[in-house]
Image (spheres, helix red, strand yellow):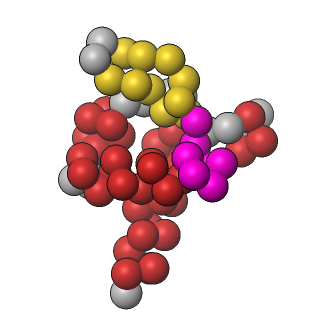
Amino acid sequence: AYVKTTNKRKAAIKKALKVGPLTVPQLAQATELDPADVLWSLTAMRKYGQAVEDGVDGDYPRYALPAKEVKR
């Protein structure tokens, strides 16, 4: 169940990031996930090259999909 939940979170985050770079609070709102869950998921996604930091929005770093994941 843990892996399934984690994969659903990552899929929701990736879908939200297809629109463009977002902060953790913005991602939490867009995905309806808890901000702590978004942060943990992003940490893992960054470790494995599935997300990158992309500037800053106020006090929060913005996250984006790496170029290889963005399909135009």
Q: Residue furthest front?
A: 47
Along the horizontal axis of the image, is 24 left or right of 41?
left
> In percent of the image, x 45 and y 79: which residue is there?
3
- Which quadrant of the view contains residue 18? top right
Could you tell me residue 38's position as x and y percent? Answer: 34, 50
Along the horizontal axis of the image, is 41 left or right of 50?
left
Q: Nearer the viewer, residue 35 or 18?
A: 35
For the N terminus, the image quarter is bottom left
The answer to whether residue 30 shows anywhere in this view is: no
- Which quadrant of the view contains residue 33? bottom left
Which stretch appears magenta?
46-52
> In percent of the image, x 53 and y 30: which residue is there?
53
Could you tell me residue 69's position as x and y percent? Answer: 71, 45
Depicted 67 relative to depicted 33: above or below:
above
Could you tell me residue 26's position as x and y percent? Answer: 31, 33
Numbered circles on residues, count: 0
> In percent of the image, x 57 and y 52: which residue is there?
47
Depicted 45 relative to depicted 9: above or below:
above
Residue 50 is inside the magenta segment = yes
For the C terminus, the image quarter is top right
The answer to whether residue 5 shows anywhere in this view is: yes
Q: Nearer the viewer, residue 26 or 19?
A: 26
> In percent of the image, x 28 and y 17: which residue is there?
59
Q: Nearer the viewer, residue 72 or 64?
A: 64
Residue 67 is inside the magenta segment = no
Along the horizontal axis of the image, is 61 left or right of 46?
left
